[in-house]
Amino acid sequence: MQATGGGRLHLGNLEGALRPWVKLQDSGDYDIFCFIADWHVLTTIGETPTDIYTASRNVAIDYLAAGLDPEKTAIFKQSDVKEHAELHLLLSMITPIGWVERIPTYKEKRELVKDNQLQVSYGLMGYPVLMSADILLYRANAVPVGKDQAAHLEISREIARRFNRIVGEEVFPIPEPLISEVSGELKGLDSRKMSKSYGNAIYISDTEKQTQKAINSAFTTPTKLHITDPGVPEGCSVCSLRRVYDPEHYTTQWEECRGGLRGCGQSKKETAEIVNASLAPIRARRAEIVADISYVDRVLAEGADRARDAASDTMKVVRKALKLAAI
Ligand code: SF4
């Protein structure tokens, strides 16, 4: 995850990524490398540096609070493992510009940067190659992605195939997407997808009161003015939260809404209680972690050591394959 916007992670991040990662970790079936993409933040800063260091730490705090376990998962910052930069450089030599230019997220980012009257940097254009280096550096077999993000992995797969073909050996496995079902389904408070940049998010680090207040202000069905007016749960932000946080009972609530048997006030109150109950253990863990911030720094340092070991093994193979080192 990128350390943008102060680094605080929201419920879309939690349900779409963090909880699925924790499941993968606890399954014991994977060696997991889980990093904080701090260099990627620089691709869109223009001329206004932000405090990426603190933001990265905040991401790490939420990773740990959500249940990522540094004993099982290497948790680290991208900028602490310089091999990411070296592999990015080498992969950039074999990646056709056309591949990068046609990526929809690059086009979106480019327009966003232009809308904000900023120059499109060389680094922004290269971000899909850096992202590919982030994955291929660990010779990853699989990358967890949201349902709407599987296409993002395609360029990394293409670059891996092209590299292997050029050097004539299988240096990189072709990474498969591990698709999480929830991502993209959690609506923000204004019924668009929950996102930091839309300002419509509820954060893991919010208090119970802030969460309650946010849900009270959420978009519901604009034509539902009285309890007896039928609502449209599919378009309602509160319903979206209810579906994710109360999967066994949400259909009853939706039917009552459609039939004009319940009001938005009742839905909001119940949903805030359910969301707060689900987040309580994570928030308690978060408070403990924040009280000992040196623990976070230790986790990041040890994670970087583990990542560096794996990364330097890959780079030895890559340098030899490109005949930069003795074979
Ligand atoms: S009653 Fe509940 S589900 Fe229906 S529109 Fe209102 S908040 Fe949404």
Image: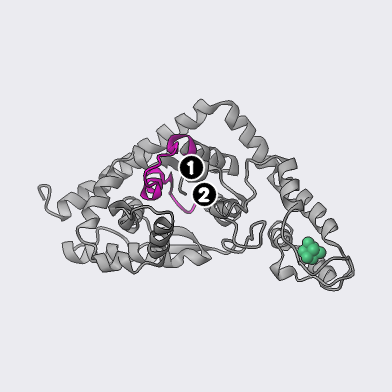
Point out the residue furthest to the front here. Answer: 117
Query: What x and y, as percent, mark residue 45?
Result: 40, 46
Does residue 69 appear in this view?
no
Residue marked by disc 2: 25
Point out the residue furthest to the left here. Answer: 326
Give the camera-side residue of 8 and 277. Answer: 8
The residue segment tinted magenta is 27-55
Badge 1 vs badge 2, beta-carbon distance below 8 Å: yes
Identify residue type, mark 2. Gln
- Residue 207 located within the stretch drawn in magenta: no
Residue at 53 percent across and 52 percent down: it is: 21
Relative vertical location of residue 11 with respect to residue 210 in this rendering, above or below: below
In the image: residue 260, left or right of residue 134? right
Residue marked by disc 1: 72
User: Which of disc 2 and disc 1 is earlier in sequence?
Assistant: 2
Residue at 31 percent across and 58 percent down: it is: 125
Badge 2, how many Cα within 10 Å: few under 14, some, many 20+? Answer: some
Identify residue type, mark 1. Lys
Q: Quadrant of ligand 1?
A: bottom right
Relative vertical location of residue 319 with respect to residue 183 in this rendering, above or below: above
Alpha carbon distance from label 1 to label 2? 7 Å
